[in-house]
Image: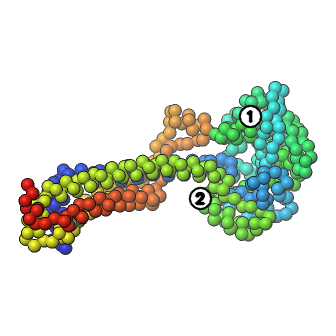
Amino acid sequence: MTKLLKLAWRDIWRNRRRSLLTMGAIVFAVIIISLANSVQYGTYDAMEELVVRLYTSDVQIHRTGFQEERTLSYSMEESEQDWAACFDDYPWVEAVSKRLTGFGLASSDSSSAGALIVGIDPETEPSVSSFANAPSEGEALTAGDRQAVLLGATLAKNLNVGVGDSVVVLTQGYRNVMGADLYLIKGLVRTGSPDVDRAMMIMPLADAQYLFSMEGRFTEVVLRTRNFRGAESYAAALQADLGADQYEVLPWRAMMPELQQMRALDDAGNYIFYLFLVLLIGFEIFNTTTMSMMERVREFGVMMSIGMKPRQISLLVTLELVMKVVLALAVGFVIMFIAVMILKDNPIPVTGELEQFYEEWGFTVEGIEFSARPVIFVFPMLAVATVALLSMIYPILRMRRFSPVQALRTT
């Protein structure tokens, strides 16, 4: 075996250019796939965190049935739980806020439009979400505000109103009690979601409770956790303690399935590109291995005539390719690991038109993020190694059919 290893190592460098070309292609594929995966995961991680913390936050608690029906009859009362101390036993809960969500008709002097009315606690809401924290125009709500609202930018445009104007709101409140009131527009918000910006109206929780005739009631409790990616396990723990008969505890993925669908669709497109690149590398390995084998037919014939068996020659060819692949993967891993670690700590700044694009959608993105998840390093190496192993099959099978006489007659 030692002799075969020495022969394989020597044979790799007999045709240095071809070997370097094959290994270079492998290194290139590993680096490209790793960097593409890194920026893909990094970008999605950053964007998901922005979207989650924008409005839904990590976990929400509703009355069982509210998520499906979205009606005020599925509201909760202040008196049914000690909501202030309810989450003290969960160290991963960082912040808690209450909301009241309903629907109404917003009217100005010139127009009317349906509105999604969200009552928030101005003191605690900034700790769980950001949608009401930084209006694109005007000022945010404060604890002392009454009869003041923030409007989605598109809703304000449709109503032909702006900061400082007034808007009348009509609602059908709790147990079909009609509600109506006049509110001063304190600011305009832009979340980046066209549907939300077209309907969003934000007001203090006390005003929303009065408008919907729901004093002492609310529709959801919003939690911010230590790690939003652990929301499923956190929600399961809360659900087990609170019980499924009375409350439903939902992680952000359950509330935003379209976000996961969009990511899955984008992942599918990226993996098609990776598959195409890996197949190209596979053809390169197959081509160079086959050419190397065909050029050395007489050499193999001589080796068989002096006593080497076809399986030993097949093993020799296999060892040559394995050495090339392992060496190339090692070099590629070192390069991509250093590159990813540097880029992870130094995101590429977002400037110019790209920065404006993100701002138009309501996001503040400082740079293009890179991720260092283990899958970023493991996936390209496994993919390339698998294709390399598959490319060995035909040359090895052909080697086993060689005979010394046929090999020596080959010119």
| Residue 186 in picture, x, y percent from top left | 77, 35
Compute the Cα span from label 2 to label 1. Answer: 32 Å
| Residue 110 in picture, x, y percent from top left | 81, 26
Q: Residue flagged by tag 1: what amino acid is it?
A: Leu
The answer to whether residue 199 is visible is yes
Q: Secondary structure at mark 1?
A: helix
The residue under the point 35% across, 52% down is 279
| Residue 157 in picture, x, y percent from top left | 73, 30
- Mark number for residue 229? 2
The residue under the point 19% across, 65% down is 401
Q: Nearer the viewer, residue 129 or 116?
A: 116
The quadrant of the image that shows the C terminus is bottom left
Q: Secondary structure at mark 2?
A: helix
The residue under the point 61% across, 57% down is 228
Q: In the figure, is residue 304 to the left or right of 224?
A: left
Circle 1 crowding by C-alpha within 10 Å: few under 14, some 14–19, many from 20: many
Which of disc 1 and disc 2 is earlier in sequence? 1
Q: In the figure, is residue 202 to the left or right of 387?
A: right
